[in-house]
């Protein structure tokens, strides 16, 4: 193979790799149900309060650090929202305040809710999406690790 052909192949490989990474880098939202959480290792372990503080201190830095990462978060359940037609959500702050909202993986939601009464501490593994439109830190596909 000539040097020119090698350079062309390398350039093609770099271009394809860069284009393949664009959708991931440009994604604004994570899927509501992502079964990869069942085998995803934890990329961070922290309290819901610390996660909230990170997003309050510098939202752009926190989003780069946590977006799409499986995080283990622990916090005190303030309420559980099981509205019809919506993902079951554990709220770690009062409903009238901003804070951390954890959407449960549908296939595990009933078991998690059964074993996690309000005002108890729980640890969940979730994919972190970041701040939602209501200024809450949104976690998705949450399970008990």
Image: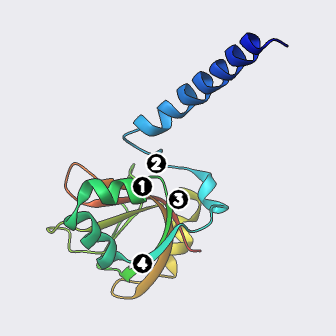
Could you tell me which quadrant the N terminus lies in? Answer: top right
Dot placed on the residue nearer the N-terminal end, 4 or 2: 2
Residue bearing mark 3: 105
At horizontal 34% and vertical 76% (from top left) the residue drawn is 48
- Determine whether, in the image, residue 41 is placed left or right of residue 88: right
Quick one: label 2, few (<14), some, or many (20+) residues within 10 Å?
Answer: some
Q: Nearer the viewer, residue 54 or 136?
A: 54
Q: Nearer the viewer, mark 1 or mark 2?
A: 2
Q: Measure how far apart labels 3 and 2 are at the Cα level.
A: 8 Å
In space, the residues marked 4 and 3 are separated at their CA atoms by 20 Å
Residue 30: x %, y % from top left = 45, 45
Q: CA distance from mark 1 to mark 4?
A: 23 Å
The residue under label 2 is 32
> Alpha-carbon distance for marks 4 and 2?
22 Å
The front one of 62 and 91 is 62
Q: Secondary structure at mark 1?
A: loop
Displayed quadrant of residue 102: bottom left
Q: Secondary structure at mark 3?
A: loop
Assess whether mark 2 and mark 3 are in contact (beta carbons under 8 angstroms).
no
Q: What's the mark number on residue 87? A: 1
């Amino acid at each position: 193979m000539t040097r020119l052909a090698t350079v062309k192949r390398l350039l093609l490989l770099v271009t394809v790799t860069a284009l393949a990474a664009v959708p991931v880098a440009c994604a604004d939202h994570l899927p509501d149900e992502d079964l990869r959480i069942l085998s995803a290792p934890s990329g961070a372990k922290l309290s819901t309060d610390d996660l909230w503080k990170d997003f309050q201190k510098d939202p752009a830095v926190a989003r780069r650090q946590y977006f799409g990462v499986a995080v283990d978060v622990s916090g005190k359940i303030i309420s559980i929202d099981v509205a019809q037609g919506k993902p079951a959500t554990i709220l770690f702050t009062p409903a009238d305040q901003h804070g951390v909202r954890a959407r449960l993986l549908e296939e595990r939601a009933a078991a998690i809710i059964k074993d996690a009464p309000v005002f108890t501490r729980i640890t969940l593994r979730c994919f972190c999406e970041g701040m939602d439109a209501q200024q809450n830190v949104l976690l998705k596909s949450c399970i008990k690790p």
